[in-house]
Amino acid sequence: MSEPKIAFWKTDKEKKRSFKDLKISLEKIEGEFKLLQDLSGNINIPDEENPAVERALRDSFLIHFRRIHHFLYARETDDEIITAEDYFETGEKWKSTRIKEAKIIKDVEKLANKVILSFSYGDNELILGKSSDDFKEAVDGIGLVFHQFVEMNLPVETPEEETVESDDLEEIQATEVEVEVVEKKYGVDKDLYKPVLVEDGYLEVQVLHKNKEVRNLIENHMDDPDYFLDNLDIYKVSKQTARKWLAEIVMDYRSNFEEGRVTFVLIE
């Protein structure tokens, strides 16, 4: 893996950081974000026998959300505190580039500050005003910013992408519905995706690559075409080939995604 285009100095800090330090730090922060995602799916689980469990899950979520938020948005002068700005020549470069902070992110960060750092008179109103859907929306929003940061820095090593046997493709394409296979290649040396126009103007996107991360992303959001439109700008600048060619599909068939007339097929 080649070294990323990162600076080892930050305007407000004095200590020099090596590529190794920054890489190890990022791996730790990526683990933190994964934990935040896992927690977001378990908040507000009713537990009448032990309400402390529900509160512990919520407070744990807020702690980890606040840490990720601080990493992405804080201006920090303490040399030992890691922030996204450490990976850029100047803090202003990241600040001017990152995705604008959504209102739900600000709201949840405000809640985290009030609930975690001190007792306050407005705690109950703030907590009761937030649902598990709000927390999930906040994680999705801050996730866009986090993935933007990752894509701008460390290149991602992708697993060896295997081709699909031609016999398997023929079996998949041999359906009763008349289809039109688009000639444009979506890949460099081999097709990573194959778009197929089927009945009623629907687009079937066959996913041929073996990149587990991107395949999981597609599987988790294949029923939500808007998700791919919302993330298009990030995919276009990605160093990960599977994401870049996914962006090509979305751009070439934008109307299908906007109208919800698209489906994905994960080829094994």
Image: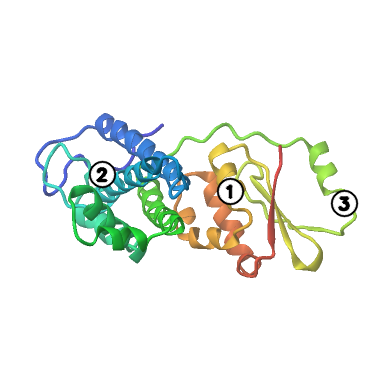
Of the numbered discs in the image, which one, if any, rests on residue 87? 2
**Relative to the observer, which residue lies in front, 88 or 142?**
142
Residue of label 3: 175
- As measured in the structure, the alpha-carbon distance from the residue carrying label 2 to the one carrying label 1 is 30 Å
Disc 2: CA contacts within 10 A as few (<14), some (14-19) or many (>=20): many
Relative placement, left or right, of 31 versus 173 is left
**Relative to the observer, which residue lies in front, 30 or 151?**
30
Q: Earlier in the sequence, mark 2 or mark 1?
A: 2
Disc 3: CA contacts within 10 A as few (<14), some (14-19) or many (>=20): few
- As measured in the structure, the alpha-carbon distance from the residue carrying label 1 to the one carrying label 3 is 25 Å
Q: Where is residue 198 in the image (x, y as percent from the top left)?
A: 79, 61
User: In the image, what residue type sits under mark 1?
Assistant: Asn
For the N terminus, which image quadrant? top left
In the displayed orientation, state which residue is furthest to the right: 176
Residue of label 1: 220
**Relative to the observer, which residue lies in front, 110 or 211?**
110
Q: Where is residue 3 in the image (x, y as percent from the top left)?
A: 34, 35
Q: What element carries label 2?
A: helix
Q: What element carries label 3?
A: loop
Q: Position of residue 26 (x, y in %)?
A: 32, 37
Up the image or down, 99 lies above or below 147; here it is below
Relative placement, left or right, of 229 versus 9 is right
Disc 1: CA contacts within 10 A as few (<14), some (14-19) or many (>=20): few
Residue at 62% x, 63% y: name it.
252
For the C terminus, which image quadrant? top right
Numbered circles on residues, count: 3
Q: Mark 2 and mark 1 in contact? Answer it, CB < 8 Å.
A: no
